[in-house]
Image (spheres, grey):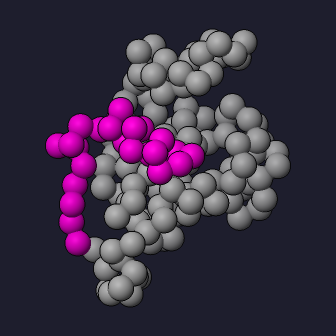
Amino acid sequence: MERSLILLKPDCVKRGLVGEVCERFEKKGLKIVGMKMMQLDDKILEGHYSHLKDKPFFKGIKSFMKSTPVVAIALEGPECVEVVRVMCGPTNARKAPSGTIRGDLAVSVQSNIVHASDSIQSAKKEVARFFKNSELFEYSGLEGTIYSSDEHMV
């Protein structure tokens, strides 16, 4: 089963939108297999945003992401990465369509409520960066209720 990392960013936490965003993922049929609130430090941010380290706006991203704790979530489901990306909408929240998380709840590029893994490969690395194996849980739930018997194994 595919997994994706979600980070509920400082603007989400400060605005009290954590429950609403989690509810959207759960209502869609994605399973939360890991969740924790954590204060990010330079080491984890430099690893997570290593592709942006040389950009002039990187210092601002680090400052923003350290401004409050974030909520890290590992979601699981068929085609989870793609489903989550569609639900979140484009990074530039001003261009995100209504009905998406960013389209409904944000108007910024940086303060856009949520980070979501952008590929299956990134998701594997990101989930491992933010969660120990002992913090990820296996449990039955949606199989046979939301997914057909031949679909939940995708």
Quarter occupied by the N terminus: bottom left
Give coordinates of residue 99: x percent, y percent.
71, 64
Q: Is residue 103 magenta?
A: no
Kindly tell me whether residue 81 is visible in this rendering: yes
Residue beneath the point at 72% across and 49% down:
90
Kindly tell me whether residue 101 is visible in this rendering: no
Along the line of sight, which residue is nearer the eye, 78 or 33? 78
Please determine whether, in this image, residue 56 is positioned above or below residue 85. above
Please determine whether, in this image, residue 9 is positioned above or below residue 24. above
Along the line of sight, which residue is nearer the eye, 143 or 93? 143
Residue lying at the far left of the rendered structure:
134
Along the line of sight, which residue is nearer the eye, 48 or 72? 48
Give coordinates of residue 124: x percent, y percent.
39, 44
Residue beneath the point at 45% across and 13% down:
42
Instruction: Give the image quarter of residue 40.
Output: top left
Give coordinates of residue 100: x percent, y percent.
68, 59
Relative placement, left or right, of 32 versus 94 is: left
Span colored in magenta: 117-140
